Image (cartoon, helix red, strand yellow):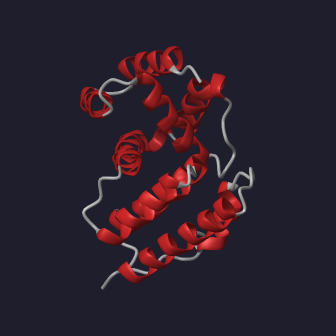
Amino acid sequence: MEYISQIEKLYKFFEFTLDFEEVHLMYKMKHSFNDDLNLIGCFFKDFLTIKQDGVIPDDESIYDNFVLWFEENSINSKQNIKEVYEYSIYYLKIIFEEFEDNEAQCAVSTINACFAIDVYPNLMCIFYKYYIQKTDTQTFYSMLKSITDIVLKRYEKVSDNILKYKDLNERIGLGEPERAVI
């Protein structure tokens, strides 16, 4: 998977389309990825999987899919860029297993030990819902446990089955209405 040209084009798009603050935020994100364009490409592929309701974009069409999504949602461009940035923070925490919360750390470590990178979009959604949309702690831990259990069962069977984003969301309860923390 060679994402370098895709991400270079994407950053040109940012420079020509976004205002200064948004471009600055995207370069801040790039810096947090240590300018690793392939890793940024992996992130955008998982981010687009979320935004396309589980449809995984082709490696060669990440730029096109992102631009299409961004243009379709251009009314909220500031919010969209902020959301990309927020999701990138969770992505890096998942990749490098850097959570202060012990239960989140254990869940992510287990998932990574099982090489279950196909569940990263689901994990990013769980963390986004918890930290930004304020899902209650009990629901957050329940979703993490569910996804970990599913990954472990699949790993123990040594199966090549890819967990589909939508199916997994339904199984762990991401499709349910939000419960606010009071």
Residue drawn at point x = 70 percent, y = 55 percent: 164
Please tell me whether residue 178 is drawn above or below residue 105 in the rendered image.
below
Of residues 134 and 3, the one nearer the viewer is: 3
Residue drawn at point x = 66 percent, y = 72 percent: 171
Q: In which quarter of the image is residue 137?
A: bottom left
Of residues 145 and 85, the one nearer the viewer is: 145
Question: The N terminus appears in which quarter of the rendering?
Answer: top right
Please tell me whether residue 84 is drawn above or below residue 138 in the rendered image.
above
Q: x, y (%) of residue 29? A: 31, 34
In this picture, residue 173 sits left or right of residue 164: left
Question: The C terminus appears in which quarter of the rendering?
Answer: bottom left
In this picture, residue 2 sits left or right of residue 43: right
Please tell me whether residue 69 is drawn above or below residue 98 in the rendered image.
above
Residue drawn at point x = 39 percent, y = 17 percent: 16
Q: Can residue 141 be seen in this view?
A: yes
Q: x, y (%) of residue 67? A: 55, 28
Residue drawn at point x = 71 percent, y = 56 percent: 158
Q: x, y (%) of residue 51? A: 57, 47
Q: Can residue 133 be seen in this view?
A: no
Q: How many labels does the image show?
A: 0
Of residues 50 and 113, the one nearer the viewer is: 113
Q: x, y (%) of residue 150? A: 63, 68
In this picture, residue 119 sits left or right of residue 164: left
